[in-house]
Image: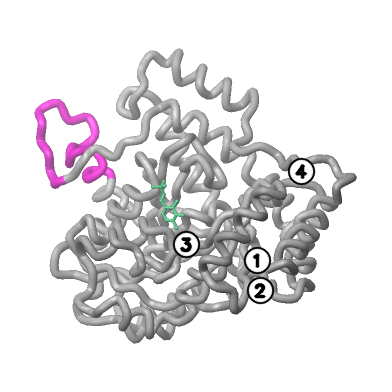
């Protein structure tokens, strides 16, 4: 291995003349907010179409996108939102910011996505939304969730912050009959540094969200008629111009990652003590936001040391998410009355993932086939000395 070149994966974010042209276009418009320019509106149209959705609304970031979508679904004080325990904290924070209670439920140990039976068991008369997170681009079981939603009358909000361009049995994220939320933060699969979007199946919920994301003010208003409560979650024209270019790159990048992940997963699966994230065959396009695996039986502190070793060996490696109920911030506002230990007992798989999982930045999956072998060699070597 010492004879090898230092590992160099493609940089992220990727950009070129399309982004430059977009920024120039936005600049020369002379109007840099959505009310005066056309970039945000064009981006919304293109993003909705790409994802098979009726409508899209671009916003400031992915956390605000979740907040806005939940608000449109009627989430507020006195209500509950069911979220997977193993996710990035925005999933629960968005509900908690609205004054609702976030109820964590366990995930599947193969796909790392919400366990539908656990979600069903958590539904109460106060539940206003169930939020599946398509972890690392792997779809949650949308068939079973669709059925749960129909049976219980509780709407779904897909947290698709990892799932730009994903497909479930030929259907895009926006074509599954529910709201979906995206992030365009620097590391995400399309980015303008920060940014977010919500997809809507119908005009009415889109219009509600539009009002609320712009201080309750209708389009073209000149007399300050703020029809709903709200805030300012508007995306600016520069971000949208970059995202239009990024959307153009997405398909090709997904093709590459879809080629690389099965190669890497196969190599990782052959290493004793390493189990890569599984796939569900019904998810027929996986954009691969993270290359994830776990080390069954490893203690959390040891996992963290191994991540450091992987980084020292040239891999962009990270510890998996901490179960949300293990974060102090989760308990500040909008936590269930259940104690943390009780939640942990009914979320054993989130406990494991939170201690044992590791992920590699998706730019590794834009590397060469040979680099997949190098990654696996490094992981094998580091784990063998664990
Ligand atoms: C990144 C992320 C978000 C939040 O997006 P921001 O744009 O960073 O606010 C929400 N949910 C998940 C699962 C994420 O990974």
User: Do the numbered discs 2 and 4 sit on residues whose CB atoms are within 8 Å?
Assistant: no
User: Would you say residue 203 sits in the magenta stretch?
Assistant: no
User: How far apart are the alpha carbons under marks 4 and 1?
Assistant: 30 Å
Is the residue 132 above or below the residue 219 in the image? below
- Secondary structure of the residue carrying tag 4 is loop
Q: Position of residue 87 (x, y in %)?
A: 44, 63
Lower sequence index among marks 2 and 3: 2
Magenta stretch, main secondary structure class: loop
Question: For this rendering, which residue is in front, 115 or 72?
Answer: 115
Q: Which residue is label 4 attached to? A: 7
Tell me if 24 is positioned left or right of 156 in this view.
right
Can I make out residue 153 in this image? yes
Residue labelled 2 has its Cβ within 8 Å of some atom of ligand 1? no
Which residue sits at x=37%, y=63%?
A: 157
For the residues carrying marks 4 and 1, which lies nearer the camera in this image?
A: 4
Q: Which residue is label 2 attached to? A: 281
Which residue sits at x=61%, y=50%?
A: 361
For the residues carrying marks 1 and 3, which lies nearer the camera in this image?
A: 3
């Amino acid at each position: 291995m010492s004879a090898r070149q230092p590992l160099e994966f493609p940089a992220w974010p990727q950009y070129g003349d399309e982004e430059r042209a977009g920024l120039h276009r936005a600049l020369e418009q002379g109007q840099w907010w959505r009310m005066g320019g056309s970039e945000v509106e064009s981006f919304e149209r293109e993003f909705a179409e790409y994802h098979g959705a009726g409508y899209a609304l671009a916003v400031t970031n992915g956390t605000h996108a979740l907040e806005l979508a939940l608000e449109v679904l009627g989430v507020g004080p006195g209500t509950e939102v069911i979220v997977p325990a193993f996710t990035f904290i925005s999933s629960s924070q968005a509900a908690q910011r609205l004054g609702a209670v976030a109820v964590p439920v366990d995930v599947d140990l193969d796909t790392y996505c919400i366990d539908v039976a656990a979600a069903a068991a958590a539904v109460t008369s106060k539940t206003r939304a169930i939020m599946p997170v398509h972890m690392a681009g792997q779809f949650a079981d949308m068939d079973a969730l669709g059925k749960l939603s129909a049976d219980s009358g509780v709407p779904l909000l897909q947290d698709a912050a990892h799932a730009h361009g994903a497909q479930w049995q030929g259907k895009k994220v926006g074509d599954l009959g529910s709201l979906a939320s995206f992030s365009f933060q620097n590391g995400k699969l399309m980015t303008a540094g920060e940014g977010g979007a919500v997809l809507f199946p119908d005009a009415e919920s889109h219009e509600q969200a539009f009002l609320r994301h712009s201080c309750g003010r209708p389009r073209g208003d000149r007399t300050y008629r703020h029809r709903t409560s709200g805030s300012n979650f508007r995306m600016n024209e520069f971000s949208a111009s970059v995202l239009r270019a990024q959307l153009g790159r997405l398909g090709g990048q997904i093709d590459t990652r879809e080629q690389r992940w099965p190669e890497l997963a196969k190599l990782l699966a052959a290493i004793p003590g390493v189990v890569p994230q599984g796939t569900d065959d019904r998810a027929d396009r996986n954009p691969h936001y993270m290359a994830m695996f776990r080390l069954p039986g490893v203690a959390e502190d040891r996992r963290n040391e191994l991540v450091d070793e992987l980084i020292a060996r040239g891999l962009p490696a990270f510890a998996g998410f901490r179960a949300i109920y293990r974060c102090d911030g989760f308990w500040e506002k909008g936590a269930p009355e259940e104690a943390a230990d009780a939640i942990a007992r009914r979320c054993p798989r989130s406990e494991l993932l939170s201690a044992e999982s590791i992920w590699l930045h998706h730019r590794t999956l834009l590397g060469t086939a040979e680099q997949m072998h190098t990654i696996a060699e490094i992981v094998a070597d580091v784990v063998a000395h664990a």
